[in-house]
Image (spheres, helix red, strand yellow):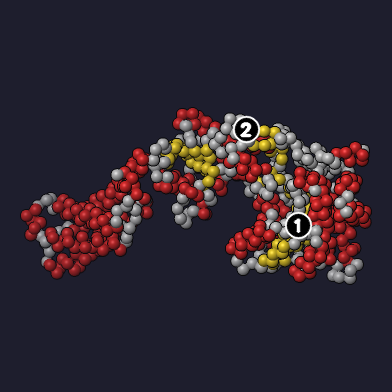
Amino acid sequence: MKLYLLNKSLPKWIILLIDQVIASWSFVFSFLLIRQFEFTDLLRGHFTIYVGLYCLVYLCTSYLMRIHTGLIRYSGTQDIIRIFTAVLTSSLIYGTVVAIVVGPMFHLQTVNIFVVLLVNFFISSSLLIMLRIGAKALFYYIKRSTSGERETVMIYGSNGYSLLVKQALETSGMGKYIIAGFIDDNPNKVDKTIQQVRVYRGKDIKKLHKTIHIDKLFVLSEDLKTDDKKKVIEKCVELGIKVLTVPPTAEWMTGHLRLNQIQDLKIEDLLQRPPIVIENKKVSRDLSGKRVLITGGAGSIGSEIVRQVLSYNPEMVIICDQAESPLHELQLEMEEAYPGSELKLCIADIQNFNRMYSIFKEYTPHFVYHAAAYKHVPMMENNPAEAILTNVQGTKNLADLSMTFDVEKFVMVSTDKAVNPTNIMGASKRIAEIYIQSLNSVGKDVQQSKDNKGKQTRFITTRFGNVLGSNGSVIPRFRAQIQKGGPITVTHPDITRYFMTIPEAVQLVLEAGTMGKGGEIFIFDMGEPVKIVNLAKKMIKLAGLVPGVDIDIVYSGLRPGEKLYEELLNEEETTIPTHHHKIKISKVREYAYNEVVADVNELLTLSKESEELAAVKKMKVMVPEFLSKNSRFEQLDTVTE
């Protein structure tokens, strides 16, 4: 019977009929009350005409205002306002009709009808509202009695949006949740009561968990970056309280928040920092109306560069990648998000000079964002020739073509692994950095000798660490291992890494590209390094599990080429601040172009001839700080020394 009542709703005509009965009874009672229940006198006073006319007016008014169409169980403030409006409108129409038309026509006995209407307004509207409140309370009582065990939850914040989350949990949650309170450190709200729910301080979360055993904390995802909220969330994770994020209000303010929109807190949310403010006007001035080539455009960094560049209204965006399926998915996404934008998608390998030449010749880009690279350290350690040919040869092809076709700026996405490299991947990226820097120093002379307009391509390098959620990142791997029940594999208990969100990294890439004059290596502020084992423990706790009990953490040992700590600068480098506090310029050694190009050509020849050891040895000569770690190429360091 209970389940039947939960799953059924009354037909609209029955609700209309019930409302009509309540309104009619209320009017009759008000009329009798004012006439002091003089029944004999009432029968002579055309009582039937008074009542019948009111019933007709209210029926028409409530039907036209559609008071009866909503589900009573979900009645809210708007429904109450509509009831008041309907009763008031009926009273005004009725009073006007009686005074002007019906009274003179039927010579009705004088009655203080406006006093009757005033009394009826309060009685009728109160009864109609009580009907809805009572039906709603009954529905949730039945729901609670059938929903089984209920969860005690709290909501972070006590503003209007937090109240909407509370209402959504109470309505959509169908009695599943007990709202124990709000968490807010605003001294004007702490210990106050809002909608019968108390506001507590963030530091009280541990004590509250002991006394009432909080199951979940709901937070608005758009405010996750504030320090106060992060402290509360970290405490919840430690206590085993499940944290769930409510999507940004812009995604549900126009409709209703649904429970399926609420997501589990992700480790990426905990690692986020306060939003970066960049010079959007300067970036827009650079990119608006320009043709922009983005290599590695289907990758995690490249695709985000595509998204952000398109927001600055470029003339054309040329997306180059050799991964067919991701490129197709990106095309569909961009065509939906930026309809009318001029997109050119090119499947190409940056190692192929002729193919890249044809792309430059056809589209003549003004800007090049070079994000294409091989980046997986252990894989490149086993395939050094491919790392060299893509990361060095590919970069050389693009840089040379940029000079040939008068590209204004060439921005290369590098890595912190290029600093004091311990692996092939990092060393190949460092050699690519050296090459484009050397090009910048001679670019003007080389280009002016072509008898062209004398433009000089400005070569800019951006260097940063790991990005959250990128392809091959440790976080998706840990998440997959947790879903399988573990164990989580960490290479070493002391290994640390810098992390940055993808949008954050790309914002800084665009900003650095705008401020670059040519030849700089821009270093991004990566915040504090994160210990990977602590990251793994937090992810286990976020899944509602206990590290070492539900899921084990095992140490697999450092992989080939891997080092414990990443660096953004080597010992010989210093930095110069810029106008943006998160971007600094690295002062690095300058290299003569003629020497660099000779070394690069020799390295590429060795790689193409599959002279693996000779190629790696040449890399160590070109980058003296390159010392292999946990790698078969460590023998070459002994020889070099």
Q: Quadrant of residue 435?
A: bottom right
- Secondary structure category for the residue under label 1: strand
Q: Quadrant of the C terminus?
A: top right
Q: Quadrant of residue 194?
A: top left
Crowd band around label 2 with a 10 angstrom C-alpha radius: few (<14), some (14–19), many (20+) = some
The amino acid marked with disc number 1 is His
The amino acid marked with disc number 2 is Asp
Left or right for 161, reference 124: right
Instruction: Please count the marks in the image.
Output: 2
Residue 261 coordinates in the image, percent (x, y): 50, 49
Left or right for 215, reference 94: right
Q: Can you tell which mark lies on residue 157?
A: none
> How far apart are labels 1 and 2 at the CA level?
40 Å
Q: Nearer the viewer, mark 1 or mark 2?
A: 2
Q: Residue visible at 61% across and 62% down?
A: 332
Residue 178 versus residue 344 in the image, above or below: above
Residue 162 versus residue 81 in the image, above or below: above
Residue 156 versus residue 105 in the image, above or below: above
First in residue order: circle 1 vs circle 2: 1
Q: Can you tell which mark lies on residue 370?
A: 1
Q: Residue visible at 36% across and 50% down?
A: 74
Most distant residue in the front direction = 610
- Secondary structure category for the residue under label 2: loop
Q: Is residue 152 visible?
A: yes
Q: Can you tell which mark lies on residue 552?
A: 2
Residue 389 coordinates in the image, percent (x, y): 82, 54
Residue 522 coordinates in the image, percent (x, y): 77, 50
Residue 53 coordinates in the image, percent (x, y): 19, 63
Which is nearer the eye, 141 or 160? 141
Crowd band around label 1 with a 10 angstrom C-alpha radius: few (<14), some (14–19), many (20+) = many
Left or right for 105, reference 491: left
Q: Quadrant of the N terminus?
A: top left
